[in-house]
Image: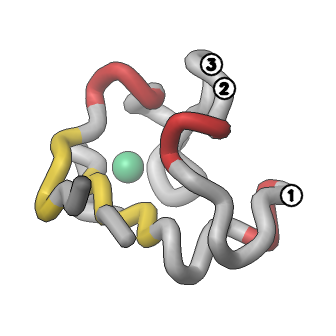
Amino acid sequence: MSRFQCPQCGYIYDEQHGCPHEGYPAGTPWSAIPEDFSCPECFVREKPDFVALDVNP
Ligand SMILES: [Zn+2]
């Protein structure tokens, strides 16, 4: 599982945990997140801005 971090506030999207509050259950891969996904913490950054922390093949 991979993790992606918001460069604005440090929020981390973890594929293992998903983002249930936004409607993405645990295990949702980053690739399944829409491009217009906004950071649920700061609402400033969107998916393309996120930084990959550890991407496993
Ligand atoms: Zn953020």
- In the image, is residue 24 above or below residue 33? below
| Colour convention | secondary structure
Q: Residue at x 86, y 57 (%)?
A: 23
- In the image, is residue 55 above or below residue 43? below
Question: Residue reaching furthest front?
Answer: 57
Q: Which of the pair 2/45 is nearer the observer?
A: 2
Q: From mark 2 to mark 1, how far is it between C-alphas?
A: 12 Å
Q: Mark 1 highlights which residue?
A: 23
Which quarter of the rendering shows the C terminus?
A: bottom left
Q: From mark 1 to mark 3, how far is it between C-alphas?
A: 14 Å
Instruction: Say if mark 2 contacts mark 3, CB within 8 Å.
Output: yes
Q: Is mark 3 within 8 Å of ligand 1?
A: no
Residue 19 picture location, percent across and down: 67, 67
Mark 2 or 3, closer to the camera: 2
Question: Residue reaching furthest right?
Answer: 23
Q: Residue at x 65, y 38 (%)?
A: 32
Q: Is residue 50 left or right of residue 47?
A: left
Amino acid under disc 3 = Asp
Residue 44 picture location, percent across and down: 43, 31
Residue 18 picture location, percent across and down: 62, 69
Res 8 → quadrant: top left
Amino acid under disc 2 = Pro
**Label 1 vs 3, first from the N-terminus:** 1
The secondary element bearing badge 3 is classed as loop
Q: Mark 3 highlights which residue?
A: 36
Q: Mark 2 highlights which residue?
A: 34
Which quarter of the rendering shows the N terminus?
A: bottom left
